[in-house]
């Protein structure tokens, strides 16, 4: 069994048992975005996290072990075609250079880490239509000179 | 003169006169991220905004007019190679499916708009090393059924 | 079972039972173009719609549930090679910039939504040869300034 | 001078003289969408059309002649990155197979011509926000059997 | 069963029973090039054609029905690598612009239809080595002005 | 001066002097399709051919010499986007495997040469609309066994 | 069974029975490079060749027949990543234009045939380290003028 | 001046002065294939070689120095489209795996070097049509185990 | 069984039996980086090495033989998307030209071999956070002149 | 002036004045690999570093300022074609997964930073042929869980 086959099984069980990511997050015991990402096969769970989620997801020992392996991250899509995901790619096309300029102006030469990184996604009520609010923070990493 | 030639000129003037995006934002009169994006050629300025920024950037009439044209947005890079920008592409690879799942679980079928959208980027002090904090909100747009 | 396997099954049943998209549309209860798109795996059906279409398509409970999941939209083809579909891609190559210019001239800076969007496709009789008539309307979304 | 250099010059003159596509359409004497497409370098103008538009666009003899040459159509972008144009590409990803299915169900095996084709783009008032309305008709071309 | 699986089965039966495209063409009752193309999964057969060919190819009812469905045309290869097919791609690289120029000079603005199209392929005896002779005619389609 | 710059100059002169490919073919003294292809920069002319065409095209000594150099053939487009040229690419997608099968059935293992090759393109009158007729013959080259 | 499945089976049998290409070449009865290429699925064997090799490779009737079919040649790799094969691709990058220049200088306008072509690969002893020696000859094919 | 601009100049001078690669090889004083490759910008010349060729090619001091710089090798074409060069790419598609298998069978795990490598290209007279003969030898490099 | 299926099996056994690469390296008897690379399917093991590792990995005779075959090296990813691997690709983007310049300045025209090559990867303690230390040496190979 | 034009100028001056990277490194005052990388346009120099190097490189004020701007890093080549650089890409193809496995086994889930990173490149004498020795250390960055 590969990790992506396990992800498929998790999605099927979630559908069959009418589970939500919120319910699964409760089992994992971390933030909703991290827990969902992990169950989608992009982050490794700890032994405890994997065992807590195993019951509701009906996982066996091999699957519990597989959840703890550091996965090969990323997808097969160079450019995402699903419209919900594509909009984030569009942000890179439009704002990418701006992020670079403002990070350098504020911090100097370096990057926002995508590893020492956290994120949340929530609903922001708005009379003109509720909004998706995403907050991300990543440690600034300075380019080393040597 | 094309818009990208104008962007090159703006960058050259900014360098020569030791301007910052913060100074230019003061002239434009909008948020720093929007103003920078616009001056980098990804958003059109209003007549007033363009005229306010024209002095410090030493722009002539044709250039002021060009700043007001809706630009052809986006870049030539399918996948960004600059490390500072690439990290955002990496987020799509790792978190893209999560964003999709959580937006659908919270809002139903639809997307976060990249048009009715705003964003900020700021420094978040942190004893373990300051962090880049990015907050973005986009209107949830529901898929129409018909 | 994945959504694309379900689409394959639907197509096989449609062929075996000599169903048409028009017949299936009657069951779904929405427009022909939306109903076909949904059954081809690009839109989620509501519980009621899925149940109404389940009988004629011989779907079981798992399949009915799967029809209600928001799908990963889009195809594997970056450029379509089927001639019937390619002609629409050709329209983008020839008319894309025109659409952009005229939308901006009429509405200002923004886009035609592909989410708050509807479409119809019908036969337009014509003595020189009948024509395919496609009407699409999408809400104009203005770029937010902030 | 190449055709794309001529298009650049037309856009510059349009900007300098504050012309609109509607004004230029009046000179060309055809529909707004066809006239704009032609002036953007995707359709050849007739001698009369080119001469009528030459005055306001300040074109010389060589440029008038160049407007009448059948152009090399299309762009350099395999996938459009400008958001306003991308939405049309997204429609192909989501609706492409539907168009194919419904054209075949209604007409049999064949395509909607992109050559014997016309289109309009207009504003459709709507209390919930005006909509972009696009109507296109293309002659159905039946695959020849031989 | 998908159409490409059916094509694989037809090729296997053809090999096992030592059939030739010429024999299969006799059953289909159309030109050799069209019949071969159809049996390779690129054209739909009529009910009569499919039934006539079913016996020798040992097809069941489902397969006979599948032969009549308009297929998704085209291949997965953007550029063909098989040398026999590649040579035709090479012709486009070398002669493509010439075809365009001469069609426009002779007919005006338009294209040679690939839909209202026929072709033959035959051996042309030649003392210096026999030649492959391909004759294709496609209806000239004039670009509509509107 | 590169060969493609020379092609551009030839096209400009052809437009300015209202020349046709037919007129230029008369000077070159070969078939219309070969002569056009050569003047478009895909075939080398002989010294005599280049000199005969030099007068009407107003070419100098360097340009006459350049016309005789074997050119780097082909274009920058992997897939042609101009609709008139694309239709030929579409033929490869639909008929490529057929050509391969029928060439092998008729001749055995080998290819149709694209080097020992000739072609013509002419108008075929037809009451239902005139047709573009293309005839190509290429020497069959048998794969050598060793 | 497809040809590539047959190749996989041949490789498995070769491994299990500790066969070498040299041994298999003895059965085929042609040069080592051609025989290996054919057994790897890139050349069709004659009936006699296929039957001679069938015993040692434990092939059944269907497989013997399949070996005689002209294969779809080539691979799925646009650029080879295996280092042993990549070096040949590197030669094209470094020497491609040289081959073209020297072939044209020596022979005139044309190509080295890859069809009427033969090759050998052998070990060339060398005190500084043995060398791989590859000799290839291909018929020069002159571009036809017409 | 970049190296590719220098190559262009060399080609122009060669054309103007009716030089051949054979003549230039005499000046360089190495094999014809290496000398041509170097003058095409893929190999650095020694000071002596560069100075010997400078006279006939009318090079100044800067150009003589540039000829001695190790160049950035390779081209912009991932897959060559010129037919004369493409045939070599086709050989990789058809024979690549064979080269790998036979090198490993003869030498063990390793590669044929493309650095410690030499090659010749000559005409091989043949009553059925002269042949291009290419001989290449490259040192076998064994994969190191550690 | 293909080599990549064998790699999958090895990874599954490693997970099930809680093996580490360090333990497996002990069996193989070479450096950790080479042993891991070999078991991941990129290097062939000797008979002895394969047999030593067979017990703990529960391999049968066929699998032991397969481990000794020179593999088709490389992956399907043109650009790696896993963040841990991508960082090495990023080094090429940033430092590639530097490596080239400094190798040429120090050694002359040539390359660092990736075949006569070794590497180690270890932890380097550091009070500011431990570091990954990679040391690689490759034989300098000088370009042959001939 | 863009940064890449400045790099071209630096390379030309270096050639004209027979400078070496070692000499330039002395002016910059950092390691040879960092200094070379910076002068090749991939790292920003400090004011002092830029001024120290300005004399020997004959840079004016604008160029000194430009050297201090954080550059857009990376190249236009998705896969490097220069053989000296390609070998590093080949290492990723062969060793990429190994690096990932061993980093995770030694450090847990995370990456080797390419930002908090240093490297050296030197000659390692060896009786069997000197070797290029590259040592790189990058801080291990642990994936944050949240």
Image: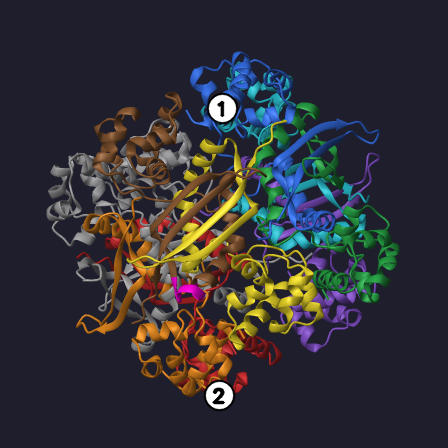
Chain colours: A blue, B green, C cyan, D purple, F red, H orange, I brown, J yellow
Q: Report the side of J89 relative to A107 (left or right).
A: left
**Tag 1, which secondary structure?**
loop
**Which quadrant of the structure image shows residue I23?**
top left
Q: Residues within 10 Å of mark 1 (few under 14, many from 20)?
A: some
State the image coordinates of residue I139 (x, y, percent, origin top left). Answer: 34, 56
Please say whether residue A142 is visible from this viewpoint.
yes
Per the image, the residue denoted by label 2 is: F61
Q: What residue lies at 69% left-to-right and 29% top-to-bottom?
A: A120
The vertical placement of J138 against A54, above or below, is below
User: Residue J17 in magenta?
Assistant: no
Q: Which mark's residue is nearer the viewer, 1 or 2? A: 1
Q: Report the side of H55 relative to J146 (left or right).
A: left
The vertical placement of I94 against F55, above or below, is above
The vertical placement of F121 against I82, above or below, is below
Are labels 1 and 2 assigned to the same chain?
Answer: no
State the image coordinates of residue H49 (x, y, percent, origin top left). Answer: 37, 80
Q: Residue furthest front?
A: I127
**Tag 2, which secondary structure?**
helix
Per the image, the residue denoted by label 1 is: A68
Which region of the structure is painted magenta? Answer: I104-110
State the image coordinates of residue F64 (x, y, percent, origin top left). Answer: 47, 84
**Which quadrant of the structure image shows residue A16?**
top right
Q: Chain of mark 2?
A: F
Q: Report the side of H114 relative to A133 (left or right).
A: left
State the image coordinates of residue A90 (x, y, percent, origin top left). Answer: 66, 44
The vertical placement of A128 against B55, above or below, is above
User: Residue I107 in magenta?
Assistant: yes
C-alpha distance separating marks 1 and 2: 74 Å
Q: Chain of mark 1?
A: A
């Amino acid at each position: 069994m590969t990790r992506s086959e396990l992800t498929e099984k998790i999605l099927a069980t979630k559908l069959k048992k009418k589970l939500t990511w919120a319910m699964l997050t409760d089992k994992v015991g971390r933030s909703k975005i991290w827990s969902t990402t992990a169950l989608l096969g992009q982050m490794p769970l700890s032994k405890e996290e994997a065992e807590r989620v195993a019951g509701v997801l009906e996982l066996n020992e091999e699957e519990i072990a597989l959840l703890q392996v550091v996965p090969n991250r990323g997808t097969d899509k160079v450019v995402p075609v699903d419209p919900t995901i594509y909009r984030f790619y569009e942000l890179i096309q439009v704002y990418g250079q701006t992020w670079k300029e403002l990070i350098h102006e504020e911090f100097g030469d370096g990057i926002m880490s995508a590893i020492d990184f956290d994120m949340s996604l929530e609903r922001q009520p708005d009379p003109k239509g509720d909004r998706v609010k995403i907050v991300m923070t990543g440690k600034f990493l300075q380019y080393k000179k040597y």
